[in-house]
Image: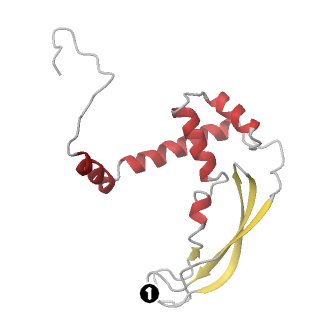
Amino acid sequence: MARTTAHPPAGRHVGLENQCRHCAACRGPVTADYRARRNVVTLDGVVALRVQVRVCHRKDCPLYRKAIRSEEEGRWALPDHEFGLDVIALIGALRYQEHRSVPEIHRALRARGVPISERSVTNQLDRYDELLALRMTDSQRLMRVTRKQGRVVLAMDGLQPEVGNEVL
């Protein structure tokens, strides 16, 4: 279903600059070609981001004419997403810590002034699950945690043994 209301206006404007001035592939200089604009819905309101985009113009470079966006943009939101990481984190916390349903999460966000639909809550909950899955499969982090604890306890839940075969 299409959006029935206009996008809310931005209450704050933030400019994001590139820190890296050299191409990651060829180490040549990259020029600031233009600024991309995008709005991100956060818990504090809508923020208009002006993102500096640099481009490598060396024809033999693998990143020739590829946009190199500001590194700080990743702190605000996922690529091509409208909602900020703080909104996604709150949705995950409301769902998994407070065991709220999607309509309850939607009402809680609307009460905080976040312009979001129920369908978007479901989509952001999917993004939260994907980010959590990435975090949980990080083998370096898992090795650090298990090394610190000294052991691993494996537990299985939700399995029903077959009749006559109670031992797993």
The foreground one among 73 and 123 is 73
Give the amino acid at mark 1.
Cys
Vertical side of 97 occupied by 39: above or below? below
The foreground one among 6 and 65 is 6
Query: Horizontal placement of 69 versus 62: left or right?
Result: right
Work out which residue is located at the far top of the displayed protein and give it: 164
Query: Horizontal placement of 20 versus 152: left or right?
Result: right
The foreground one among 81 and 89 is 89
The quadrant in which the N terminus is found is top right
Q: Picture quarter containing residue 107?
A: top right
Residue at x 20%, y 42% (from the top left corner): 151
Residue at x 66%, y 41% (from the top left corner): 120
Circle 1 SS class: loop
Residue under numbered circle 1:
26
Q: Picture quarter containing residue 111?
A: top right
Residue at x 78%, y 61% (from the top left corner): 12
x%, y% of residue 39? 73, 59
x%, y% of residue 54? 60, 81
Please rate how many residues cluster around mark 1, counting C-alpha atoms within 10 Å: few if below 14, some from 14 to 19, many from 20.
some
Query: Horizontal placement of 105 versus 95: left or right?
Result: right
